[in-house]
Image: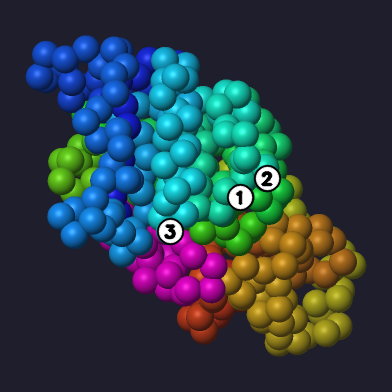
Amino acid sequence: MTIWNPWHGCLKISPGCMNCYVYRRDESIGKDASIITKTNDFSLPLKKNREKKYKITPEDGVVFTCMTSDFFIEEADLWRQDCWDMIRVRQDLHFHIITKRIHRFMECVPFDWGDGWENVTISCTCENQDRADYRLPIFLKLPIKHKEIISEPMLEEINIEKYLGSGKIEHVTCGGESGNNARPLDFNWIKEVRRECVRNQVPFTFKQTGAVFLMDKKTYHVDRKYQMSQARQSGYSYVPGMGMAENISYQLPDRDALFLRLSKSTFRSRFHLSESDRKYIEDKGIELIKSHAADFVEKRLSSENPENDGKQTPMKGHPVFKAQHATACCCRSCLEKWHNIPAGKKLNKKEKEYIVDVLMEWIKREGN
């Protein structure tokens, strides 16, 4: 990875900017981060060594561009074309540009941009739902070859599934905020976006916990040096087909506590066996019903990313279907929310047996 900062300094434009790390860093050395200036590294992509070879090579990895400013900030309009010229020359490098100013994109592209350049990835940031719903519709319509979404700092739970469903997003990254005044990151927000990515087969990275991390109703204050490693160790990053979720550590819920919690859910507690359901169970026998449950779990829930996940279990038609909704074993999202079984992993034998056991226990309780 290489960082290329052709200019430095930025102007705050949205809630995610409030505790900007550039402002914090500049303030610590008596510098005004709101003043935008060209840097000595402006021509970095074209700089050469004594052997007349480029200092930056493809082996150095992705060139993250303008990390202490915004590439599309108005104050840099006079300098940007020179940067595009350098990016055009260095087709052997891949440039990654992250922006909160996606609304200015078409005003700022070079004359020969066309439908995008293969060696440029643009990441649109969205720190909350409001910014997601403003920026992402603009983002999806733009002629860009490689599009990614970043929610960092993530300030609330966001739903971006309709944007992921476009098939135009290559990667999503989420993370918390650092610094003394950091706003909290709730692990449940991370899990929700990750589930959306799993359903749409979009790679996801949980980048960092941030300084204030909420998990299991507890607040953790995480030292800066551990924020990225703790996120990485959680195992909640995801790449389709790589089996990464197999390493996530979790604990199945206490059975009595689970059923008590389910009984307090307005939605879950509305499901009951009808007289026809009871007769069906009596006629077929409980062992056959159990085999039906195992078959439904295997075919509809067990894969890494079940087809039509979230809608694969009918509301009626079989007693087991009702049991699945009543016990939150109807889809992979519910399995994670209620039973802690992570989305994005192929269910193992123990997990499938656990689900069937829960379903049969509910049916048994309904019969008493």
Question: What's the magenta region?
Answer: 230-253
Amino acid beneath label 1: Lys
Cα distance in 3D space between marks 3 and 1: 16 Å
Residue 115 is marked as 2
Tell us which disc is closer to us: 3 or 1: 3
Q: Residue furthest left?
A: 29
Q: Earlier in the sequence, mark 2 or mark 3?
A: 3
Q: x%, y% of residue 120?
A: 50, 48
Cα distance in 3D space between marks 1 and 2: 7 Å
Name the residue located 53 percent from the left edge and 73 percent from the top edge: 241
Q: x%, y% of residue 74?
A: 47, 16
Mark 3 in CB contact with mark 1 (< 8 angstroms): no
Name the residue located 57 percent from the left edge and 32 percent from the top edge: 109
Q: Which of marks 1 and 2 is nearer the N terminus?
A: 2
| Left or right position of 240 against 34 | right
Amino acid beneath label 3: Asp
Q: x%, y% of residue 184?
A: 33, 31
Tell us which disc is closer to us: 2 or 3: 3
Crowding around mark 2 (Cα neighbors within 10 Å: few <14, some 14 to 19, many 20+) is few
